[in-house]
């Protein structure tokens, strides 16, 4: 009964979670002539650009010239534009406008404990770049806020997301604290003379677990909704 109470409270609260936002603003990427831009600022124009990997080598090749990937800031093959976002990782530009968006697709594998098997999938990491500037930054509240002008619909929506993020953080950390206090209270009661009475500690554990799950999902949802802010900004909203 006690564990049912914990699970019931957790599921009841976390049921309020919403789906993660899916980015619909892809497009408006201006194709560039094949070129390589080094981190030193030097730009090399050419006819053909490709990335070559394997045998512990990772290079960007433009015509007959080779450059180590870690030394390249940007490159374009004439069809897609790429930005260096982590030493040797290159994210492809998927949207252009007031805020350029780059996405890094990474194959991941994880253990499925229920089926005792290993599964694979794709993780998406987003990066942003203010139009007219070179620096590419990870998508985050801190990085996107200076890119959104005041008195716009996108700015108001960003403020809304910021408030929700603060609520989610409070739910997450408050839930963790409530769970710990509940566990302590439950242990004390079970060792005392009222072991068979209604266990308030277990109730607190259930509520704490529910708030923790809700806060965690809420933080993830608010992060994904930053993509909607970008859509609105690129539509001049």
Image (cartoon, grey):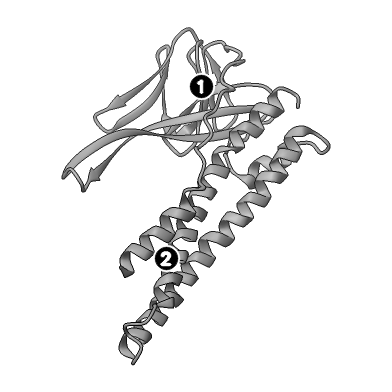
On screen, residue 70 versus residue 140, left or right, reads left
Residue in the picture at 50% in, 65% down: 175
Q: Which mark is residue 206?
A: 2
144 lies above or below 45: below
Dot 2 falls on a residue whose secondary structure is helix
Q: Which residue is mark 1?
A: 75
Specify the quadrant of the image occupied by residue 49. top left
The residue at 71%/29% (across/down) is 233
Picture coordinates of residue 217 (x, y %)? 48, 49
Vertical order, 62 against 151 (above or below): above
Q: Quadrant of residue 166?
A: bottom right
**How far from the left and from the top, in percent, is residue 143?**
64, 43
Residue 98: tell me if it is visible: no
> Residue extending furthest front?
197
| Residue 115 shows up from this direction | yes
Q: Which of the two labelled residues, at mark 2 and mark 1, occupies the earlier sequence position?
A: 1
């Amino acid at each position: 009964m006690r564990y049912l109470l914990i699970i019931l409270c957790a599921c009841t609260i976390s049921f309020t979670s919403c789906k993660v936002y899916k980015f619909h603003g892809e497009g408006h990427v201006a194709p560039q002539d094949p070129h390589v831009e080094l981190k030193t600022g030097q730009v090399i124009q050419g006819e053909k650009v490709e990335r070559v990997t394997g045998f512990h080598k990772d290079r960007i090749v433009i015509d007959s010239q080779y450059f180590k990937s870690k030394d390249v800031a940007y490159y374009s093959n004439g069809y897609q534009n790429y930005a260096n976002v982590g030493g040797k990782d290159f994210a492809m530009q998927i949207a252009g406008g007031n805020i350029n968006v780059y996405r890094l697709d990474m194959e991941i594998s994880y253990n499925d404990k229920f089926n005792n098997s290993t599964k694979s999938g794709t993780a998406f990491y987003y990066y942003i770049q203010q139009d007219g500037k070179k620096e590419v930054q990870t998508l985050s509240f801190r990085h996107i806020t200076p890119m959104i002008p005041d008195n716009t619909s996108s700015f108001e929506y960003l403020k809304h997301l910021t408030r929700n993020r603060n609520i989610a953080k409070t739910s997450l950390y408050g839930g963790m604290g409530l769970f710990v206090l509940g566990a302590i209270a439950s242990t004390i009661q079970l060792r005392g003379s009222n072991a068979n009475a209604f266990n308030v500690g277990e109730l607190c554990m259930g509520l704490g677990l529910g708030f923790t799950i809700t806060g965690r999902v809420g933080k993830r949802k608010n992060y994904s909704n930053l993509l909607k802010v970008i859509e609105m900004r690129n539509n001049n909203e």
